[in-house]
Image (spheres, rainbow, N blue to C red):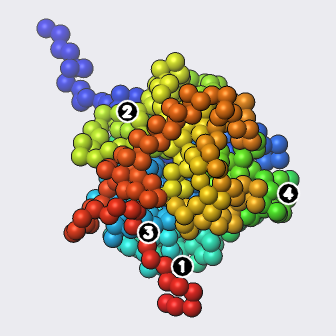
Amino acid sequence: MTICWACFAPAVTRAEDRPPNFVVIFTDDQGYADVGCFGSTDIRTPRLDAMAAEGVKFTSFYAQPICGPSRAALMTGCYPMRVAERGNTKQVHPILHSDEITVAEILKTKGYATACFGKWDLAKHAQQGFYMDLFPTRQGFDYFFGTPTSNDRIVNLYRNEELIEPKTEMATLTRRYTDEAIAFMRKHKEQPFFAYIPHTMPHTRLEASPKFKGNSPRGLYGDVIEEIDFNVGRLLDAVTEMGLKDNTYVIFTSDNGPWLVKNKNHADGHLPGDHGGSAGRLRSGKVSTFEGGVRVPCIVWGNRHVPAGQTCDSIASTLDVLPTFAALAGADLPSDRVIDGADIRHLLHGEFDKADPDKAYFYYLRVHLQAVRQGNWKLHLPREDEPVGAVEFRRNVHIAPADRIGFDSPFLVDLERDPDETTNVAGDHPAVVQALLKLADEMRSDLGDYNHVGKNMRFFDLEGPRPTTPPLPVRPKRGTK
């Protein structure tokens, strides 16, 4: 009798047979055209360009106009207007309610190791006085190495919930976040993992390490992007060296458009002294619902199902990350709430013919619905020059005066022909205008607008009736505490 010893061998699960790994690299204020393959001529990004050549480049990928809301959208798969916040207010930067469900929490149900490396910004927009019980470690992440919020003045660095370096040296952050992420992936390479890397840079204050500082023709801003590019390469190399490329999705994108107030005369970033980025031909930048404020570079790389050298022009956004990762991991979505994003596995895999032709994207600034896109058509809704619903950005000093405008009537743009958003073609396409106005009305009913709370806006702390208008926090008058 011949004994089949292989029958008694322990089962081995190959990496490609496990649920896929996910790595999300999320930069801060990097403009659409601040990558070579998206049009930059003065910032060198060889690793990102190679990533696009080996993967899928998304040309109509959207985030939110500013950083806190973008993080809320990515984590929950929902428009920031929809998510519940502590105390039921609608902050400029959401204070994400503990009963909201993050993508990390969903992946944990399938045995994922989860970690966050960088800027959190969902426990209060402050380096001190934030809510520790809303830190990443309380929102589905096993491990955190990063900072509570933006680096406007300082960065306090935490490991998990312990402050390890007050006022840390900012020039070290891009490398150190990457070091920690690689170490995490190596530690958990035998199980599925989710590594979320929301970089501090290129949000100002800008800093680059000595290896990169002073090297870019674009000045310090270029130095910072080139250092990010180098460290993206380190992450991709680590995934490859561990033999995990065929079962790992790596997504690179940004949280919003360029911070034009950091550029001379609010111009698109191009001077060596400019500390903000460039949106290229796209109009305006951060804190704007023109394309330059919300359309961001996006590249997907890695998994054996991701084709090389493909470009996807279909609408996609950070809202889609949660439902897509859940589907790929075989996890269930919450059934007790609306999720705005959609499963876009087909787009990641190059099956662009399966894109939903009716998919719409809604442009909110704060609690104000300002525009809607479907296909190549984008409709700016009528609004005042200083819209009440955009408070605290009613008088929007972040963008150039030419973009601080209102619309007396619907302003229709064909984004394929007019990415600059300069020509109103509403009179030539009345049916398109009516269809987009209908979509806007449906969204107002479902989610709301500055003067209306939609039926599916979430409030988890209510003791009385639902508010009828979005509950904006009361700001103290000048001269008072």
Foreground disc of the pair 1, 2: 2
Which picture quadrant has residue 401? bottom right
Which residue is found at the position 49% from the left and 83% from the top? 476
299 is higher (above) or lower (below) than 165: above
Residue 224 % position (x, y): 71, 57
Residue 92 % position (x, y): 50, 65
User: Which one is nearer the viewer's eye here, 181 or 70?
Assistant: 70
Q: Which residue is mark 4?
A: 271
5 is higher (above) or lower (below) than 168: above
Q: Earlier in the sequence, mark 2 or mark 4?
A: 4
Q: Is residue 435 left or right of residue 453?
A: right
User: Which one is nearer the viewer's eye here, 59 or 480?
Assistant: 480
306 is higher (above) or lower (below) than 84: above
Q: Which residue is mark 1?
A: 166
Quarter of the image with the N terminus in it: top left
Q: CA distance from mark 3 to mark 4?
A: 38 Å
Q: Are marks 4 and 1 in contact (CB under 8 Å)?
A: no
Q: Earlier in the sequence, mark 1 or mark 2?
A: 1
Considering every residue shown, the one lying at the far top of the view is 1
Q: CA distance from mark 1 to mark 3?
A: 32 Å
Q: Which residue is mark 3?
A: 472
